[in-house]
């Protein structure tokens, strides 16, 4: 029901834009969160955007570099990533649910898209 796209292999310092598309569900009814999981590590919060006023929050590690946005008319949400670092390498997931940084607040998840940043 949620599908991420836009992942790939980039070099340090590059930018990448991930998209999350919902099918069979109105994404505009939910907050959208972005999470990531690096090999051997737990899944962690990256950023989130609220469903109505577009309020956003970010993890310390990506604040100032990543930006969450959404287009409710298109039923999509994006994660713009700039100044990418090798430590940003992970599988990135989008999720829909209640606004916040707790993955337990999100009800619906995509399968993830791989982002690899080479040094």
Image (tube, grey):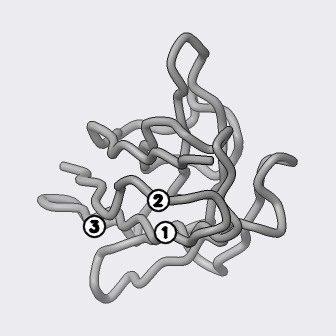
| Residue 92 spot, x, y in % from top left | 45, 43
Residue drawn at (39%, 53%) of the image: 9
| Residue 58 spot, x, y in % from top left | 77, 55
Q: Secondary structure at mark 1?
A: strand
Sequence-wise first label, 2 or 1 = 2
Direction top: furthest residue: 40
Give the numbered dot on residue 26. 3
Residue under pointer 1: 16
| Residue 96 spot, x, y in % from top left | 43, 50
Q: Secondary structure at mark 3?
A: loop
Please tell me whether mark 1 or mark 3 is closer to you in this view: 1
In the image, is 33 to the left or to the right of 9?
A: right
Where residue 27 sits, quadrant-wise, is: bottom left
Residue drawn at (54%, 47%) of the image: 118
Sequence-wise first label, 1 or 3 = 1
| Residue 7 spot, x, y in % from top left | 35, 56
> Which of 6/101 is in front?
6
Give the numbered dot on residue 92. none
> Which of 114/119 is in front?
119
> Which of 93/109 is in front?
93
For the residues bearing labels 2 and 1, Cβ distance under 8 angstroms? yes
Q: Is residue 89 positioned above or below 82 on the image?
A: above
Give the numbered dot on residue 10. 2
In the image, is 34 to the left or to the right of 66?
A: left
């Amino acid at each position: 029901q949620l599908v991420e796209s836009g992942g790939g292999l980039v070099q340090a310092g590059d930018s990448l834009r991930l998209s999350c598309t919902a099918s069979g569900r109105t994404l505009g009814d939910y907050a959208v969160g972005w999470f990531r999981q690096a090999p051997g590590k737990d899944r962690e919060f990256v950023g989130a955007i609220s469903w109505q006023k577009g309020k956003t929050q970010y993890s310390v590690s990506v604040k100032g570099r990543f930006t969450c946005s959404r287009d409710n008319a298109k039923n999509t949400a994006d994660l713009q990533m700039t100044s990418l670092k090798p430590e940003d390498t992970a599988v990135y997931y989008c999720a829909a649910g209640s606004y916040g940084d707790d993955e337990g607040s999100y009800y619906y998840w995509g399968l993830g898209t791989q982002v690899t940043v080479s040094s």
